Amino acid sequence: MLKGIHPLLNADVLQALRAMGHGDDLIIADTNFPAASVAKQTVHGKPLRIDAPAAEVVKAVLSLYPLDTFVEDSAARMEIVGKPDEIPPVQTEVQKEIDKAEGKAWPMISVERYAFYERAKQAYCVIQTGERRFYGCFAFRKGVVPPDAE
């Protein structure tokens, strides 16, 4: 345990988050997501794991990870097949954590399932969670930490 660092954030995840640069994508995915095969195509090359529900993982990650303020797609969710406007409870919970972390409403964009897979393949890394509910898959684009931040 370290002071100020969320206990879900293990050493492998912290290393990956630290190595990422502005504009790199992070995928946080549910247990059904093909994390191993997709992660092989990412910069990191292998999946990372945090065995907790998606909203808890997002809360932990966003305690350290700045979202990109220069683009509109810095927070994204996988659309439900055939129901692109439906927001399941797992996505509502994650949206609340994003809004808390940013201190304001920060709506996620929706990404069609196969387009989401393609975005994930271009990501820096994939964190597979213990989330068992369907459509617990999210993409977060890294922003910058200003010089005066602690």
Image (spheres, grey):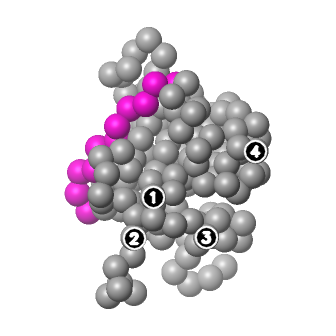
Tell me: residue 133, above or below residue 13.
above
Q: Residue at x 38, y 20 (%)?
A: 84
Q: Earlier in the sequence, mark 4 or mark 2?
A: 4
Report the span colored magenta.
103-113
In the displayed image of the protein, which residue is found farthest to the top? 82
Please tell me which of labels 1 and 2 falls first in the chain: 1
Q: Disc 1 marks which amino acid?
A: Gly
Tag 3's secondary structure? Answer: helix
Question: The C terminus lies in which quarter of the figure?
Answer: bottom left
Q: Give the CA distance from mark 3 to mark 4.
A: 17 Å
Inter-mark Cα distance, 4 to 1? 20 Å
Mark sitting on residue 125: none
Q: Which mark is residue 19?
A: 3
Residue occupying the point 32% across, 88% down: 148
Q: Nearer the viewer, residue 13 or 144?
A: 144
Q: What amino acid is labelled 2 in the image?
A: Val
Circles 4 and 2: CB distance less than 8 Å? no
Relative to 21, is 122 above or below? above
Q: Are marks 3 and 4 in contact (CB under 8 Å)?
A: no
Find disc 2 in the rendering and name its residue: 144
Amino acid of disc 4 = Lys
Question: How far is mark 3 from mark 1, CA to CA?
Answer: 12 Å
Q: Is 104 inside the magenta-drawn segment?
A: yes
Q: Quick check: marks 3 and 1 in contact, CB under 8 Å?
A: no
**Mark 1 near mark 2, Cβ–Cβ under 8 Å?**
no
Dividing the picture into quarters, in which one does residue 50 lie?
Answer: bottom right
